[in-house]
């Protein structure tokens, strides 16, 4: 039997799972679970670990108190399970988007960015999931539709609309990933960014020749003193999003 990570992913089968059209086999033992319970249990494990790598069908089965093989009645593989997990956490973003009434395209994109930023803080493992192929679950498509709606009719053509939304997502994902990396560094080393900078800053000053690297010394010193760390993801997120939206405004002006 193929392993959890190498089982082939059947797009049609996965779509039937995500859209709730898959029918469980009538033969075999009476079904005590459903696919939703399996997905929710997997999300709880990944959230607690803040990492997708340790997730396994065995751990999900243990959490549910069933045999590992019984899970394959509901999901065909670990990869399919992860796709279902991703579509499930999108539901919170969809609900929040439907509750928002932005007054402008700029406010709308701010909402889109902020909701995705919060999603990655709550479910950092989602940053580890390959999304190069479009997610085709109902929540993924609803999320895409609602996010596009905030820039519909403002003067962009359809390809530009998709590109602007991709730009926002790329910014959010990139900075969120740096924030998660910083969090993992704290867990791995046992010291905070502030503690690291307090030790690294003075040590670097003893060996760094400012005349050899004048710009790096000046800018790095200013940024380090401002953030009391090597980086500040929250500052990078806000600064980058503001510049990004200014670029969209410039595009609209032309």
Image (cartoon, rainbow, N blue to C red):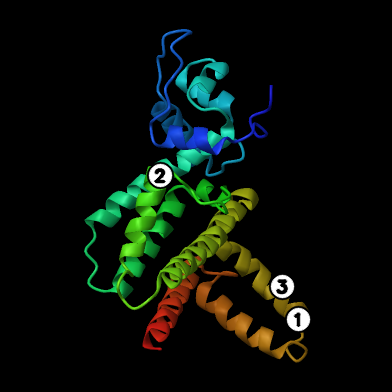
Between disc 1 and disc 3, the foreground one is 1
Residue drawn at (57%, 32%) of the image: 78
Q: Do the residues labelled 2 and 3 touch (CB within 8 Å)?
A: no
Give the quadrant of residue 224: bottom right
Between disc 1 and disc 2, the foreground one is 2
17 lies above or below 241: above
Q: What residue did someone put label 3 on?
A: 203
Q: Residue 150 at what x, y percent from top left?
A: 31, 67
Give the quadrant of residue 7: top right
Q: What residue did someone put label 1 on?
A: 208
Apparent side of residue 203 relative to residue 139 in the rendered image (left or right):
right
Residue drawn at (54%, 71%) of the image: 228
Compare marks 1 and 2 and give the one earlier in the sequence.
2
Compare marks 1 and 3 and give the one earlier in the sequence.
3
Compare marks 2 and 3 and give the one earlier in the sequence.
2
- Label 1 to label 2, Cα distance in Å? 46 Å
Q: Is mark 2 on a helix, strand or loop?
A: helix
Category of crowding for the residue at label 2, using alpha-carbon neighbours closer than 10 angstroms: few (below 14), some (14–19), many (at least 20): some
Residue drawn at (78%, 89%) of the image: 212
Residue drawn at (53%, 60%) of the image: 179
Residue 56 vs residue 35, the one in the foreground: 35
Q: Residue 180 at what x, y percent from top left?
A: 54, 55
**Which quarter of the figure is the N terminus placed in?**
top right
Category of crowding for the residue at label 1, using alpha-carbon neighbours closer than 10 angstroms: few (below 14), some (14–19), many (at least 20): few
142 lies above or below 178: above
Q: What element carries label 3?
A: helix
- The tag on residue 89 is 2
**Which quarter of the figure is the C terminus placed in?**
bottom left
């Amino acid at each position: 039997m193929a392993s959890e990570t190498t089982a082939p992913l059947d797009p049609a089968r996965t779509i039937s799972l995500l859209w709730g059209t898959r029918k469980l086999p009538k033969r075999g033992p009476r079904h005590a679970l459903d696919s939703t319970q399996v997905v929710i249990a997997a999300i709880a494990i990944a959230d607690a670990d803040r990492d997708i790598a340790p997730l396994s069908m065995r751990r999900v089965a243990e959490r549910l108190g069933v045999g590992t093989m019984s899970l394959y009645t509901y999901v065909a593989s670990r990869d399919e399970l992860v796709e279902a997990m991703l579509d499930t956490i999108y539901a919170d973003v969809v609900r929040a988007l439907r509750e928002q009434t932005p007054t402008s395209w700029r406010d709308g994109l701010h909402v889109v960015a902020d909701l995705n930023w919060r999603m990655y803080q709550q479910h950092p493992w989602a940053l580890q999931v390959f999304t190069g192929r479009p997610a085709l679950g109902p929540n993924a498509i609803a999320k895409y539709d609602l996010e596009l709606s905030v820039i519909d009719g403002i003067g962009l053509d359809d390809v530009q609309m998709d590109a602007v939304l991709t730009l926002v997502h790329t910014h959010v994902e990139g900075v969120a990933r740096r924030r998660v990396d910083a969090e993992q560094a704290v867990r791995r080393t046992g010291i905070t960014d502030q503690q690291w900078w307090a030790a690294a800053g003075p040590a670097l000053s003893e060996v760094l020749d400012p005349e050899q690297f004048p710009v790096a010394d000046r800018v790095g010193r200013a940024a380090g003193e401002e953030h009391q760390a090597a980086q500040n993801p929250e500052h990078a997120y806000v600064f980058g999003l503001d510049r990004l939206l200014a670029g969209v405004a410039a595009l609209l002006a032309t």
